[in-house]
Image (cartoon, rainbow, N blue to C red):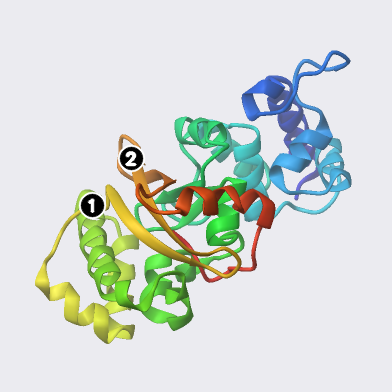
Amino acid sequence: MASAKYTELGAFLRSRRGRIRPADVGLPSGPRRRVPGLRRDEVAQLAGASVDYYNELERGAGSQPSPQMLAALARALRLTADERDYLYHLADRPVPVSGGAASHVHPGMLDLLHRLTSTPAQVITDLHVTLVQNPLAVALLGDQSGLTGPRASFVHRWFTEPEARDLYPEADHAAQSRAFVADLRAAAARRDAKDTEARSMIDTLLRLSPEFAALWPEHDVAFRRDDRKRINHPAIGRVEVNCLNLFSEDGRQRLLWFTPAVGTDSAGLLDLLSVVGEQDLSESSH
C-alpha cells in the first residue's frame, strides 16, 4: 500500500473515531474521559481487533487491513456507505458488492441492533448472509463471522451442507426448505434485472441440490416476515421462538430478532443464554 494513502487511512480513522460519542455505541461515557469521541482501544474492541493492531493502523503503519477487518471497522465507526467505500479505497481493497458478507450494514439497522440488548438479534442480507450479530444471537445461533463466498449464505448451506440443518428439528426441515425457496424467489425478483448474484446462487443450488431443484419449479414466492421456529441448542435444549423481521427500504437487509413463543418455557431458556455464553455453532444461522 502506498505510504501516503496509508497515512491518509490513519487520519481518516482518527477523524471518524473522534465524532462518535460512547453512548452511540453502548459504551459508558464516564467522568474522566480525555477525548470527546471513542478511544482507540474501544474501536479495537468494537471491531474485534487487537489494540496494538488498531494503533498501527491509525499511525499509518502495519499490514494492509483485510476486507473483513475493513467491514468491521466501518460498522464500529458507524460509517456511511460513501465513507465505507472511501475506507476501502484508502486500503487498496475493492469495494464489496452488495449482498456479500462484507456488505455495509444500514446505519439504522445497526443502531436498532445495538439497542436490542435483551433479545437475540442480527442483520442479514436478502440472500441470508449474516452481516452482524449481537452477543445473544451468537449465543443462540453461533458465530457467523468468517464465512465467505457462497457458504456465507445460510440458504446455500441449508441445501448443500446437511449439518447446517441441525439447527432445526428434523420434522421442521421440509417446511423450512419451502420457506427458504419462496423467500429466495421473492428476493431475486426484487433485485435489478442486471443483478447476477441472486441468479448465480439459484443456478448453483439447482445444480447441487435435488431438493432445491424439485421445489424451485413450484414458483412459490413469499418473503419471510415472521416465523415461529423451534431451535436446537446444545446447552439449553429446544427453544421455541418468534422470529420477527424489519426490512430496509430497498429490501436488501433485514433486522431479525427473536422473542420467546407464548405458552412455552422459552423465556426462561433464553434468559440462560447470557449465562451459557457463546457456543461453537459455526454451521448454525438464522
Mark 2: which amino acid?
Phe
Q: Residue at x 54, y 31 (%)?
A: 115
Mark 1: which amino acid?
Phe
Q: Residue at x 57, y 37 (%)?
A: 117
Q: Distance of mark 1 from mark 2, alpha carbons?
A: 10 Å
Find residue 46 and name its label: none
Q: Residue at x 25, y 50 (%)?
A: 191
Q: Does 215 appear above or below 142?
A: below
The answer to whether 225 appears left or right of 113 in the picture is left
Find residue 247 and name its label: 2
Q: Is residue 105 visible?
A: yes
Of callouts 1 and 2, the N-terminal one: 1
Q: Position of residue 212 (x, y in %)?
A: 25, 78
SS for dot 1: loop
Residue 279 occupies which quadrant of the picture? bottom right
- Residue beneath disc 1: 223
| Label 1 with label 2: CB-CB less than 8 Å | yes
Residue 280 occupies which quadrant of the picture? bottom right
Q: Position of residue 31 (x, y in %)?
A: 84, 13
